[in-house]
Image (cartoon, coloured by chain):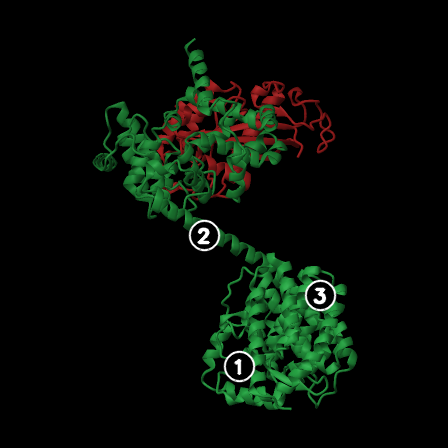
Amino acid sequence: MSYAYLFKYIIIGDTGVGKSCLLLQFTDKRFQPVHDLTIGVEFGARMITIDSKQIKLQIWDTAGQEAFRSITRSYYRGAAGALLVYDITRRETFNHLTTWLDDARQHSNSNMVIMLIGNKSDLESRREVKKEEGEAFAREHGLVFMETSAKTAANVEEAFINTAKEIYEKIQEGVFDINNEANGIKIGPQHSPTNPSLPGATGSSGSQGGGCC
Amino acid sequence: MKTDCAIKDHILRDICKNGQEITHLLDNDLSADNCILQCSTHSASESYENPPMGLKNQCHKLVVSNNLILEDSRSQSLPDCFLDEKDTKNGNLEIVDNCDIKEKLLFQEASPPLSPSSESWFKTWPERCDRIKSNETSPSNSLSKSKNTHTSKDNNCDINIPINGLSLNEALQNISLAYSPVTKQLHLVETPQNNTVDEVDHVSTNQNLSNDLQSSVDIGTSEQRKLGHRRIEAGSFSSTVSSISESSTLGSLLDSDERSLSNFEECIERPSKKKSFTNFLSRNVFTWKPADVPSSVGNVLKLFGKNTQLLPSVSPQHVVASSSALIQHPRPSNLPAKSLEEEEKHREEYKAILAAAKKKEALYSATREKLEKKQLRQEERLTNAAKHFTQLVLPNWETMKMNKKTRELWWQGLPSNVRGKVWALAIGNELNLTQQLYEICLARAQARLNSPEPKTSELAIDQEQSMDVIQLDISRTFPHLGIFQEGGPYSEVLHSLLAAYVCYRPDVGYVQGMSYIAAILILNMEQYNAFICFANLLNQPLHLSAFTLNQNQMQAYYEAFNELFNYNLPRLFSHFRNSGLTPDLYLLDWIYTIFAKAMPLDVACRIWDVFLRDGYEFIFRTALGILYLHQEALLKMDFLDGAQFLTRLPDNISPDLLFKSIQTISTNIGKQTFSQIVNRYSSINEHQSLS
């Protein structure tokens, strides 16, 4: 399928916070109560539409265990977006956010959009981390925040799509150099100035801005 | 027209002699085709000189069958046969005289009667038939049954009797002979009224199987059950013939028969001719089948079991019962009769139904049989392998582990009952771990788990963290098996083993992936041995580097793998390099779990078998085997599709195909072994990191 852009995403966060389940819910629209653990990295993909443009998301779902940090660090390279996930029912996963953020900032492109996600919002009775705490952490570090549930699919679409929207806006603003693939953005192979889905669209490439929002 | 006993005895001896000879010859393998042909001809001609009554025809027919099959020139062989037959007619005239004596002899004896199966087609002229029937009710039936179970040749009982050790009188009695006033000969006979109907049908339908069935349906009363049996054989027979030569073989044979024989004789003769041909086939073509099948009927049924078994409509009583057969019946008298066209139409419809069912069943049974055979072979192989390992290898491990046969059986997959033992021996216990040590570690781990008070030292915190992760990961190990989940039978075992390892090697701790390795071991051996194997396995260089996250060393392995990849599969290697698909992305999972997560459990165990035989190189060899197996598909994939494919391999992988693929992969490049390549890269990496 043709696409205008391809964005590389990386999902990070402690082990067992539901990274793979979020991905599965986003790509396959299903939930597996018992998911086998991720070793190294697994991959997912989905096409979304933003501003009438087809955007392919290439998602890297990483192993969460501390021990694997040295390995997952290499996966940040070339990521345009990151989902930093914690589990609202396990405070320690929230406490580890700073180390994850440091790692992400250190090994990725400085323009990488990071979305903070508090997962398992369906388990309200077991909540250990208040929503406000998440919001505060996000504000403090300049992240977008959202609470999701991979089980009920609440906010899962939004989490992935809002991140993509922000990346797209950065492209329109010219923040991202889309010709440098190290930024995690690739122009689609069939991308042409006149997008078939929107014949009237302006701009030969995303970096020049245009289109009405 | 009475002759003395001497003549009778003489004739009987001839029967025995020729019978023995022919049977013996026929018992030979088909590999001696020509010999059989020659000898049979010889014995047949001998029998012509002293025609042993009904046997003459049998011998003759056997020769005919031989000619038909072996020379594959019916048109040529047939005229000769008829010449023969005509020649022997003179001889037969003599026999006619003996008829009375023989009959007298037969019924003076209270010897065992015919078995029901032979009776079905050995019926004689009415008066004899009656007497035989009365004999049948005698309690000595078992003897005749055992005679029949002895060999399939009993249907041509006149040939075989001497071999079976039966008395001559019995032999004679079993020969259903009758004098035909038309031909002035003795004949093997059947119930005449059945034959007439049958044969008319046969002539009109040219031995077609469905017509055979058709005719049995036409006769269609339960009275005809036995005939039905014979019919089944005829059906099976003609289908066999069609697979060997053409179904017209018999037709042409019959045509020529018609020319030389009277209609009446033909009616009597043909079934027995078919019989002998069937027997010939069952004896010589299908030599693999067991010799001691219950009766010739059973034999044929068994031989063509799939047809008869799966075609219930073949058996007349079923045919009658089935709704499709009902259309074959004439309407009750109070209803107007079927028109000819209607009858014909119904016949056609029924034929079509039968043909379709037969086709379907044949297909189904063929695949099923194939599957069963494969399964059987597999089971047999495993039994033999298990025997080899338990009797030879396990008691003499050091000397036998490198044995060629051992290694071969090992490659084919260890039988599950010896797998754990062989694995334990193959892994060994270099670390000299003892049960006490395991128990100490276990106790310490349990104490730690039960008292989660904060530890002061950093190491303790690390350990505790990895303990927490264990808890999380237990239920995420082989989730589909459902045995490691909370409350599952192995949940605790797996937890204790991993926790004990963390206490044994706090410097390594628990790293994700270990749970799969431990689980595979637990599935194949008991807990303590699993721990020993686990600890020793993780002490091997590759896994020690992996679980201590020694990135430099792991990089050396990846680079060595790349070199091997390029050497074995250059096309795919360059495709992957162009798309940016680096080996660490897919190898990591394969190394950390030794394919336990990536492969179905049975395939994973087979990979483990050879991994423990050949060492860590086999992991990389298997990786290349997987890439080779899917090379064509992978060549068409971009980075994302390729990465997704390799991190989530299809579940329906065939172990045989995979191992075939692995076999083509070499782990040596020239004279360099994989370890040497790894060492080269690790020294380069070391040098680079220093400078």
**Residue B645 falls left or right of residue B415:** right
Say which residue label 3 marks.
Answer: B247
Residue B310, by quadrant, is bottom right
- Could you tell me the amino acid type at mark 1? Leu
Cα–Cα gap, marks 3 and 1? 31 Å
Q: Position of residue B223 (x, y in %)?
A: 60, 84
N-terminal of the pair, mark 3 or mark 1, is 1
Picture disc at residue B379: 2
Q: Tell me the chain of label 3.
A: B
Q: Nearer the viewer, mark 2 or mark 1?
A: 1
In the rendered image, which quarter contains the N terminus of chain B?
bottom right
Picture disc at residue B102: none
Residue A13, by quadrant, is top left
SS of the residue under disc 2: helix
Say which residue label 1 marks.
Answer: B114
- Could you tell me the amino acid type at mark 2? Glu
